[in-house]
Image: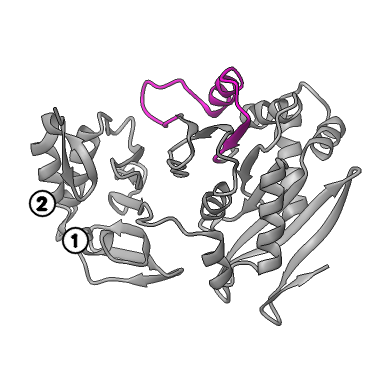
Amino acid sequence: MNNTISTIFGEVPIAKQYEWQWVEDNFKPLKKWFQCEGVTEIFVDRFDSISIERNGKIEKTDSTFGNEQTLQNLITQIALCLNQTLTDESPIMDARLPDCSRLCCTMPSVTPQGATITLRVAPKDLISLEQLVEFKALSADMANTLQRHIQQGSNLIVSGNTGSGKTTLLRALARFIPLNERIITCEDTQELYLDWLLYRVSLEAPNRKGSEVEMKNLIETALRMRPDRIWVGEIRKAAAADAFLQAINTGHSGCVTTIHANNTIDAVSRLQYLIASQGLISFELAEKQIMGSVNVLIHASRHADYGRRITEITEIKNGKFIPVFTFNPQTMEHEIN
């Protein structure tokens, strides 16, 4: 018996079909953009200020909710449908819609200009590595190098700013994971969608009221699940950084994570700082362990002048950084070092 029903947000429980129908009926200012090809983000900065990101560029729209209360009612109803609570004491919601679109909502107690919605639309079709080459996000030589590293089980760190394409790159690279391997993914909010892999388990640590599960717990759990590879969506906290380092220092290969940093070398410094801040090992020892366990550093960038690009690939050999590829913004070309 089918216990779900289809909506624009994906399959939802029949028991909540009327609640979700209310959401869909009141989602009209955003529906057009939610279903529009090329739109990856929707930003509601105020009830009457709605923008989208389409094909890498932000555009203002003429859509509006009409008034503040209508927007707040929509957010509150979405929270109810997702079994979450929004109050003055808990005014931020980080959630995932049934179709895996990522949602961050705030209420006026933290955004005085009014309630807000930031919606990262789940991709309808996953972008392949070949398509990223066509889009000039990276060169064919870079793609071949990364494919080889994935197939041989190198440990990777992907750095970059928000919206730079880190997750998109990981999805594309995941196509080269051998199908006989078991992969465990650990994410705050599921975004990787590696459904084609035969032996895959997705772990999620949602930022929800009453939940004490954090990324550190997911990584430690993954280690007990006999993984061939552990892919961590993003490292933000010291405990998660330390847990990831322990994973790659205990014989696990093919592990991957992302981190916010300015370049590949800065990514190591950032991870080093997080690990050392735990107080368990020194700053210098943290660097030594990272340099001895990580094989490849990749930096992704989102820039107003050139859009999304993989701007650096650096290998680590014998404890030294070896730049392999860089993006030259003057020539708009990727160069071999």
Q: Which residues are magenta?
A: 205-233
Q: Residue at x 17, y 44 (%)?
A: 6
Q: Secondary structure at mark 2?
A: helix
Q: Furthest-left residue in view?
A: 18
User: Measured from the top left, where is residue 302 in percent x and y?
Assistant: 56, 64
Per the rendering, the mark at residue 25 is 2
- Specify whether residue 210 is painted magenta: yes
- Residue 76 appears in the picture as rendered: no
Q: Residue at x 19, y 63 (%)?
A: 64
> In the picture provided, is 107 more to the left or to the right than 324?
left
Above or below residue 84? Residue 26 is below
User: Measured from the top left, where is residue 309 in percent x and y?
Assistant: 60, 66
Above or below residue 50? Residue 109 is above
Residue that numbered label 1 is attached to: 29
Q: Residue at x 76, y 37 (%)?
A: 272
Q: Of residues 47 and 174, which is closer to you in this image?
A: 174
Above or below residue 50? Residue 175 is above
Of the 4 image quadrants, the one containing the N terminus is: top left
User: Measured from the top left, where is residue 29 in percent x and y?
Assistant: 19, 61
